[in-house]
Image: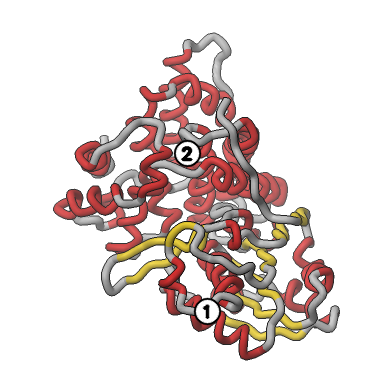
Amino acid sequence: MQGFSLDSIRRTVFGQGASEQLGQEVLLLGTKKVLVVIDPQVRSAEVADPALKSLQQAGVKYVIYDRITREPEPAEADDAATLGREFGAQAVVGIGGGSALDLAKAAGVLMTNLGPATEYVGLELIKKPGKPVICLPTTAGTGSEVTFTAVFTRRADGFKGGINGRMLYPHTAILDPLLTVSCPAYITAITGMDALTHAMEAYTSRAATPLSDLNALKAIELIGDNLRQAVAHGENLAAREGMMLGAYLAGLALAQAGVGAVHAMAYPLGAFFDIPHGEANAVLLPYVLEFNLMACPDRFAEMAYALAELPDDLSTREAAEACVQEVYELSDDVGIPASLDALDVPRERVPEMAAKAMTVARPIANNPRKVTAADLELVYQRAFMVE
């Protein structure tokens, strides 16, 4: 058993209606002035109104930043931090999907660390603690509410990378399944498969620990039990609860063990073609699992039994192969595109994509099977082929 260290968020609040406790949670931080970073679609849909109302009821003043693109640019974090500093905010609230939560975390550290976001892209470059951040996810997928990463895209040069480090951990996660009820079926599907990717890559990571294993396996079980129902009927609160808890646990596992080649290969799809991160992960996951199976079939077998009901008498190899097949079937059931062709990715860019993916160093190093650029090219090519 290898040694490990553990950092994480300080507080988690879970349950239907939990977002109405936002005002109380802000007061617990000892402040009455906050910057609210919110997804513009979430704001217009009035999904976050109970949370914002709770701020008003608690006497908390706030300013809103909602100029957020789908895959945020570093300049957006700079703008949000500037707004927060000018307002005199002593804390940051993030409401939305992964982009809004990442932006909130970045704004929190940029409010106390001088310089633009681009200066901190990398690992552990933030030296001073940021303003405390409270995250309210409105999708069950990214796990950003419990991770130490804020990912950005520079469209001008096709760069995608993140600010990574302990200073980015949020202070509090408020997990209210009611915030996900209005999430469209397709967004529910791709964010749910994103969470499954986090759990499976963490469980097979070379940096996995006993604690990350517990979180990852339970996340896989919850997603397997609930994703189809959440997509089929968005008002199924039991399924929404299961997915929110599953995504949270998957995020914890990701933070503890890291991810692998799926994430590395997804980065170029976002940087080059503006494909949402969750969608890229969802399409690539089964193809990368096929490639990785030989490295740890025992772990694949364990994931298979967590994901689905299978006969007890399967051999390790049979169960491992069933894991991959179950992911293919789950993806198909919830409407995930079957190939990169469906995302309009040009095949001639595969060598460039593979080369770029190899530069995403930590996920490549964490992958259970050693990979080369040539290997990634083959996996990308496989992901274009629909049987």
Using the image as rendered, state which of residue 292 and residue 167 is in the foreground.
167
Instruction: Kindly state the secondary structure of the residue where label 1 is placed.
Output: loop
Dot 1 amino acid type = Leu
Q: Count neighbours of disc 2 (C-alpha within 10 A) and say few if under 14, some if 14 to 19, many if 20 or more.
A: many
The reply to whether dot 2 and dot 1 touch (C-beta < 8 Å) is no
Query: Residue 283: percent from the left, percent from the top?
Result: 37, 46
Is residue 381 rendered to the left or right of residue 62? left
Residue at numbered disc 1: 114
- Quadrant containing the N terminus is top right
Dot 2 amino acid type = Glu
Is residue 54 rendered to the left or right of residue 41? right
Task: Say which mark, if any, is on residue 275.
Answer: none
Q: Where 191 falls versus 199 (above or below)?
A: below
Residue at (26% x, 70% y) in the render? 157
Query: Residue 330: percent from the left, percent from the top?
Result: 48, 38
Q: Count neighbours of disc 1 (C-alpha within 10 A) and say few if under 14, some if 14 to 19, many if 20 or more.
A: few
The earlier-in-sequence mark between 2 and 1 is 1
Residue at numbered disc 2: 201
